[in-house]
Amino acid sequence: MRRLTRRFHAREPVTLARALLGQVLVRVLDDGERLAGRIVETEAYLGVIDRAAHTYGGRRTPRTESMWGPAGHAYIYFLYGMHHCMNVVAQGPGHPTAVLIRALEPVEGMARMRTHRAGRIPAARLRDVDLCSGPAKLAQAMGLDRGLDGADLVDGDQLFLERGRRVRAEDIVSGPRIGIAYAGDWALKPLRFHLRGHPHVS
DNA sequence: ATGACGATTTACT
DNA sequence: GTAAATCGTCATA
């Protein structure tokens, strides 16, 4: 399959958030096994002007450093003391914007994803729809953590994006982002995108 | 050095 | 619908 290019990523976050729907996120584990999922839900974070973004007001700390770097790299953070979430960095230096990947439709490596996701509920009981239907779920299923923060999605070999099926504009639904009630006016803006009626959306 | 908090998930009432 | 889990990060002192 064909990789997405640097140019593909170096666009405004809203444009990228829509363009990422239908593309395929690939994770190659240390033992060589390939896990993959089709992106079905995203959110755009608009950088220094966006109260919900980690770079709001120009905040630049060790945690958010990769958001300040070039487009097409991963920004992976840890929150609530137990979860990781993955973003695709948009635009480029000076514009610390990104797209949160909120849900995938698993397409390769589901058995391995089950072992990663298994907890109180045994792996055998987890259905495909339980594997990647949320930002922290997909990070756990795909084996993503701070060790992959900053990874180059265009040239890297552990985590990257491949061209998927084309998505029609009329199949994209937008709405408010999730879990950012503290962000005032920004909490209401329609910066969440997903494929209409898709069963793997969070 | 300390304390408040979070781009979530899961279990329980 | 409500709440607990759980800790790195960052602003404040």
Image: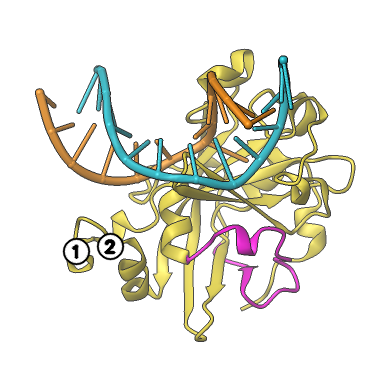
Chain colours: A yellow, B orange, C cyan
Residue type of the residue flagged with mark 2: Ala
A168 over A44 or under it: above or below: below
For residue A154: magenta? yes
- Tag 2 and tag 1, C-beta contact below 8 Å: yes
- Find the residue positioned furthest to the right: A94
> Residue shown at 53%/62% (left/top)?
A144
Pointer 1: residues within 10 angstroms few (<14), some, or many (20+)?
A: few
Q: How many marks?
A: 2
Which of the 4 quarters of the picture holds residue A48?
A: top right
Q: Residue at x 48, y 29 (%)?
A: A179
Disc 2, SS: loop
Q: Is residue A197 magenta?
A: no
Quadrant (top left, top right, bottom left, bottom right) of the C terminus of chain A: top left
Mark 1 is on which residue type? Answer: Pro
Distance, label 2 to label 1, CA atoms, is 5 Å
Start-end of magenta stretch: A143-165
Quadrant assignment, res A148: bottom right
Q: Is residue A196 visible?
A: yes
Quadrant housing residue A63: top right
Number of the label disc, if any, that sits on residue A118: 2
User: In this view of the protein, which residue sits in the foreground, A167 or A46?
Assistant: A46
Q: Position of residue A154 (x, y in %)?
A: 74, 68
Where in the figure is residue B10, as x and y percent of width and height? 26, 45
SS of the residue under disc 1: loop
**Mark 1 sits on what residue?**
A122
Q: Main secondary structure of the magenta part?
A: loop
Residue A25: x and y, percent? 56, 64
Above or below: residue A177 compared with residue A115 = above
- Whether residue A188 is visible, yes or no, is no
Assign the N terminus of chain A to one quadrant of the image. Answer: bottom right
Is A96 on the left or on the right of A102, as rendered? Answer: right
